Image (tube, grey):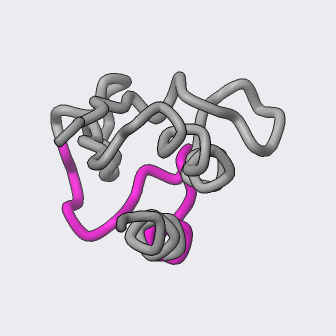
């Protein structure tokens, strides 16, 4: 098994705001598969007042910089489809 620790903020920006986001990750899932990645380990992506995200203020909301719960669900579903 190959895990990829992912800091979403710096991974891939899909909307041109300079910050990586869930839609960007979804667009790059094939790239990760080509690298041999089986699992993605997210650094904190939940709503937080801190830049690094480790002081989570709401465990039921995605940091709006990255998208929303719909984006998270779509990305996870697409990622699960890539597994063999």
**Which residue of the protein is positioned furthest toward the right in this rendering?**
16
As displayed, is residue 44 above or below residue 51?
below
Whether residue 69 is visible to the viewer of this picture, yes or no, is no
Q: Quadrant of residue 15?
A: top right
Between 69 and 37, the one lying in front of the other is 37
From where the camera sits, is residue 36 visible? yes
The x, y position of residue 76, in whole percent, is 41, 68
Q: Which residues are magenta?
A: 56-73
Q: Quadrant of the N terminus?
A: top left
| Residue plotted at (55% across, 50% down) | 29
Q: Quadrant of residue 18?
A: top right
Q: Compared to 67, does 33 lie above or below? A: above
Q: Is residue 22 left or right of residue 5?
A: right
- Give 76 or 47, whichever is nearer the viewer: 76
> What residue sits 50% from the left and 39% below the top?
32
> What residue is rendered at 30% in x and 48% in y?
38
Tell me, yes or no, whether the highlighted magenta stretch contains residue 68.
Answer: yes
- Horizontal and vertical percent position of residue 40: 31, 45
Q: Is residue 69 magenta?
A: yes
In this rendering, would 33 be left or right of 37?
right
Instruction: Tell me how many marks there are.
Output: 0
Q: Residue at x 23, y 36 (%)?
A: 2
- Left or right position of 63 against 4: right
Q: Position of residue 57 (x, y in %)?
A: 21, 51
Which image quadrant: the C terminus?
bottom left
Q: Residue furthest front?
A: 84
């Amino acid at each position: 098994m190959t895990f990829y620790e992912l800091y979403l903020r710096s991974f891939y920006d899909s909307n041109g705001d300079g910050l990586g986001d869930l839609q960007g990750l979804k667009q790059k899932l094939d790239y990760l598969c080509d690298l041999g990645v089986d699992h993605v380990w997210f650094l904190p992506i939940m709503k937080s007042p801190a830049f690094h995200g480790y002081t989570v203020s709401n465990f039921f909301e995605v940091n709006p910089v990255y998208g929303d719960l719909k984006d998270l669900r779509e990305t996870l579903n697409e990622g699960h489809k890539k597994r063999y």
